[in-house]
Image (cartoon, rainbow, N blue to C red):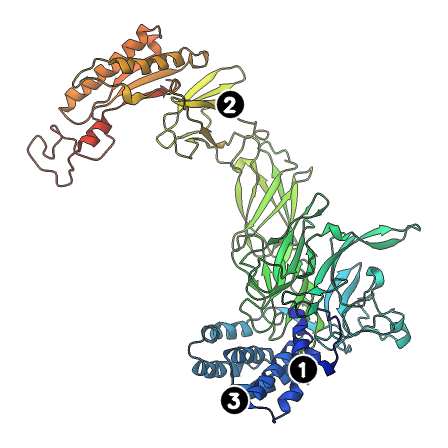
Amino acid sequence: MRYLLYILFTVGACQMGMAQFSRADFAEELMERWKYADAYPIWSELAADTTFSDSAHWEFIRQASISAQKADFIPEADQWNAQLLQSGFDFETDWIRQFEMVCLENRYDDLQTLIAEGKLRFPESTSILKWQNGINELIALVHDSTSFEVTKLRPQSEAEEFCAVPYDSTLVFMSTGLNAGFVPQHDGWTGQYYTKLTQIKDLKVPFKEYTWFEQVRNQDLFQAFDPTRVHDGPIAFNAEENYAVITRNHNDASLDTTGRVVRSRLKLEFWLLSKDEEEKDVWEQRPDSLFPWNDRHFSAAHGTFDLNEDLIFASDRPGGYGGMDLYHSKWVDGRWDEPVNLGPVVNTAGDEVFPFVSKTGAIFFSSNGQLGAGGLDIFIYRAGAAKLERLGYPINSNGDDFAFVFDEMEGKGWLSSNREAQKDAIYKVKGNPTAGKLTVHVQSCDGSPLSDTEVKVINVDLGSEVYERTDNEGNAHFIAQRNQSYEITTQELEGMNTPPVIEFLMLDKDSVSTTLDMNFEIELNRLTIVDLDGNPLPNALLSFENDKKQRLNRVTDEFGIFEWGEEISKDYSAVHVSLINYWDGYQGFEQPPAGCPMSIQKTIALRPKTEESEVIRLDVINYDNDSDKLLEEGKLELDKLISIMNDPQWMSYRIEFRSHTSCLNTVAYNLGLSQRRSQSCVDYIVSKGIDPSRIIAKGYGESQLLNECADFVTCGCEDENKQLDPNCRECTEIQHRANRRTELRLLPDE
C-alpha cells in the first residue's frame, strides 16, 4: 500500500459534514488529512463532470490522479494522468508522476519515449533531465538479477499483509484483514481496516480461515501486545526475544504545522517479557519516558535492534535529509539516547524506512530516494561503507519492496511487496547462504591465548567494520560474508601500539577459523616529539630508563622522530624527554603480551616555557663583527643554561654548543670563527664549575646554511674560476643574519 511509503502516518480525527463544504473543499480537506482513499471518489466524480471551466476541470483530474496514486489505485491514477498530459494544462510534476507510475506498472519499454516527450514539453526541467540521464542505469537495474527464489506465502489471503518477523518458531506479521473489536474502523488513506498483528503458529500451515465469531472475539489477532483501535505494527524483537519494539499511533491527535488539520503521528512502544504471579510469560509495556524522542509533531517508527541491542528506526523528525530518515539511538543510563542520523550514504531526500539488522550487522532497509526499479527498493548498508548494496530481481521489483528480513547464515527470509496488482503480500525468500561463522583466535607470541581483547574485522571491498572481544580461550566470533576479503587486527595492546594485520578471504563455508598471532608484529618502535601545535621538535633528548634507574640517551631527528628495534631492551619501560626551552615530558611503556617485543607508537607533546627567567634566548648570544668575544648579554643567557645543568635531573646529560656563520668570507675562515665562538661559550660555562666533559664546543661555519642562496667564496654567484652558476641566488642581508646563529643540542650516549 502506498501509505506504507509514508509509514502509516495518520489517523484522521473529527469527521466533518459534507453540508459545511463544497465537494472540492471537502475532498481537499480529506487530502490534507491524508485520507486519499476517501478523497478519490469525490475527485473522480468532479473530474468526470464536464460542466466546469477548463482550468477547474483539469485540476480536478490532477487531484483524482494524485489521490488515486497515493491510495495505490495505480491503474486509475494512470488513466487520469494520461489525459492530463495531453491537455495543455499539464505541469512538470504531472510528467514525473507518470514516469513513476510507468515503472510501477512494469512498462519500462514505454519509459524512454515518455521521458523524451516530457523533455520536449518542459525543456528546462532539471527533474526530467535527471530521469533522462538515468534511464540506461534504470533499465540495467531492472534486468539485474540475484539467485533468490521468491514465492508468495499466503496466496489465499484477500487482505493486505506485510512486515513478517520470526518469533519463537512462529511468524508475526501485519494485516489489514483483521477485526479490532465488534465495530472495526477503516483507514481513510487506504479504505481498509487499520493494520493489526497476527501470527502463524505453524509455518507448515501458513493460512487458516477464522469464523466471524472468532474474529469478533479477536482470536485472529496476536494479542500479547494489547491491540488498539488504530494501527499496530510493525514489531521487532531482540536476539533473546525478551524485548520488543512496536510502532503505533499516538493516543491523542495534535495539530500539524499548518494548524489546519488534525493528525496522529506514529510512536515507538517498548515491551519486556516477564513472569506473572503464576510464573507464566507475559509482555509488559515499558514507560514512555524510556524513549523521550516520540513527538506528536513528527513520527518515530519501524524500530529494530542492532547486534548491540541499540535501536535503529525511521523518523521524519526535523534536521534530516528529507522525508523519512534512518536514525540510531543507544541505550544509556536507563533510557534511549538522543538519535543520530545515519548520514548521507543511507539517507536521501526521499524515504528510508523498514530497517532490519542482519547477523552480520548489515542494515537492510527500503528507499525510494536511491536509484531503483520503481517504488521502494531494498538496499544494504554496512557500517563504515562508503556506498550501499542494492539487491536485484526478484528481491527488488517495479513495485514497493520492503520489510526484508533475511538470515544470511541460512539463506532464508521474508519479504513484503505489492508487485502483484499493487497489493501488499508476504513472500518467502530462499537463496544460497551469504554468510558463515568466522572464529578469530588471538594468541600471544608464546602461544598463550589473549582474552578480553577487541578484534576488528574490516571488509576490504566495502570498508565496513565489525568488532568483537575474545573469550577466555582467546576466540572472537563473527558472522562474515562469504567470498569476501577481510583485514583482521586487534586493538592497541599494552606495550604494543601496532598490532598485526592479516588479510583473510572468507570461504564459501558454514564455518571458518583463523589465528591472529602477535609474532606477525613488525618489530619497530617510534616516538614522535612535537610542540602543543603539533610541530615536530628535532634534537629532543630521550632518556630511556629501566627499573634499575639505568639510562640510555637518544635524540630525535629533524622530524622529531626516534625509531628503534631490539637495540633498546623492553626492560627500559619509560622515557624522559628534555629539550631546551621546553618543560620535560614523560612516557611510561606497559609490558607487551607474553613473549612479544615492545611495539611503541607514541606522540609526546612538550609544553614551552614562557617566563623570561626560564627561557634561554639563543638569539642574544652575539659577538662583535668578526670577533669571538662573548658579549655581556650573552653571558646572562648562558647563566640560565648553567643553572639547568646543575639541576640533579640533568647531571647525566651532555650538551653540544653549536655556532654557525653566514657565507661571507672564506669557508676556512668561517669554520675557524664559528669554532672560536663556540669555544668562548664553553669556556665561560666551564669557568662556572661545569665539568668540561659535559659540554662540547663545535663550529660549523657556513656548512649548514638555513636558506638556498649563494655559498661561494665571496657569497656571489661566481666560483673560484669565475664561472657563473645560472641557478645561483645571492643572499640578502636578512638571509645572512638568519645563518649567523647559535644552537644547543642535547647529545645521545656515545
Three-letter residue code for mark 1: Tyr
Mark 2–mark 1 CB contact (< 8 Å): no
Between residues 267 and 566, which one lies in front from this camera angle? Answer: 267
Frontmost of labels 2 and 1 is 1
Considering the numbered disc 1 on the image, is that residue within a helix, a strand or a loop?
helix
Q: Which residue is mark 1?
A: 40
Instruction: Give the x, y percent position of residue 483.
Output: 57, 57
Residue at mark 3 to residue at mark 1: CA–CA distance: 21 Å
Residue at which label 2 appears: 574
Q: Quadrant of the N terminus?
A: bottom right
Residue nearer the viewer, 313 or 12: 12
Inspect the image, locate mark 2, and give the three-letter code of the amino acid beneath it: Ala
Question: What count of labels does the image hold?
Answer: 3
Query: Which mark, by number, is residue 87?
Result: 3
Specify whether 576 is left or right of 713: right
Mark found first going from the N terminus, 3 or 1: 1
Labels 3, 2: front one: 3
Q: What is the secondary structure assignment of the residue under circle 2?
A: strand
